[in-house]
Amino acid sequence: MVPADVDEAREGDDAEQVVLENARRKVRAVLPGREPGTLVIGCDTEVFLDGRILGQPGTPAEARSYLEMMSGRTHDVLSGLVCQRPGGEERSGVCASWVTFRKLGGEEAERYVRSGEWRRRAGGYAVQGLGSALVARVEGDVSNVIGLPVGLLLDLAPEIGGK
């Protein structure tokens, strides 16, 4: 894995275009100089609530604010995925899932923030960890909510699944 150090788009009228553009930027940052035949995969996962991107919170207070905003509500999780080989054609797609949070009490949100799991997580939670206790329901691909929509990846690059 080669991390891509890119400036990510944070705003736009179309949430799908934002995540696709960010994934595309990641691929373009890593693709040059790769061996022929190397598959480069770029993915960007964002949480959207009320038309706003809830990125990675920078402070415990911001993480708590995100949890309070999502409490008892449903938010969108979108991932843009781009696959490309050097000199090859780009394949891309978007995966959408919907996550409904339970109604959270103040102490419950505070406990989660104290856990530190919110760090470096879109929306300030991790559904695959302690954050699963915050969630009432996931509609769609849970791997998308975790951060890599595996079904979409296999659709775009079936060769990695042995097909």
Image (cartoon, helix red, strand yellow):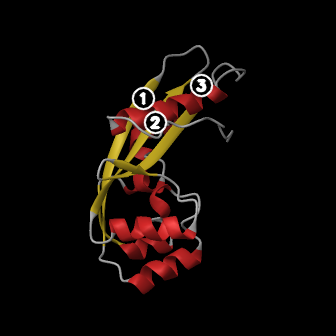
Q: Residue 28 — which label?
A: 3
Q: Nearer the viewer, mark 2 or mark 3?
A: 3
Q: Which of the 4 quarters of the picture holds residue 54?
A: bottom left
Image location of residue 101, percent across then percent down: 32, 69
Three-letter amino acid code of the residue under disc 3: Arg
Q: Which residue is identified by label 1?
A: 92
In the figure, 22 relative to 87: above or below?
below
Q: Are marks 1 and 2 in contact (CB under 8 Å)?
A: yes
- Cα separation, mark 2 vs mark 3, equals 13 Å
Between tags 1 and 3, which lies in front? 3
Q: Residue at x 32, y 46 (%)?
A: 96
- Mark 3 element type: helix
Residue at the disc numbered 2: 81
Q: x, y percentage for residue 40?
A: 59, 30
Location of residue 60 in the rendering, given as x and y in whole percent from the top left corner: 56, 70
Left or right: 129 as drawn, with respect to 96: right
Q: Residues within 10 Å of mark 2 (few under 14, many from 20)?
A: many
Q: Earlier in the sequence, mark 2 or mark 3?
A: 3
Residue flagged by tag 1: what amino acid is it?
Ser
Which element type, helix, strand or loop, lies under badge 1? strand
- Which residue is pictured at 47% across the width and 40% down the height? 10
Picture quarter with the N terminus? top right
Q: Which mark is residue 24?
A: none
Q: Residue at image x 59%, y 25%?
A: 28
Instruction: Give the farthest residue toward the bottom.
Output: 107
Q: Secondary structure at mark 2?
A: strand
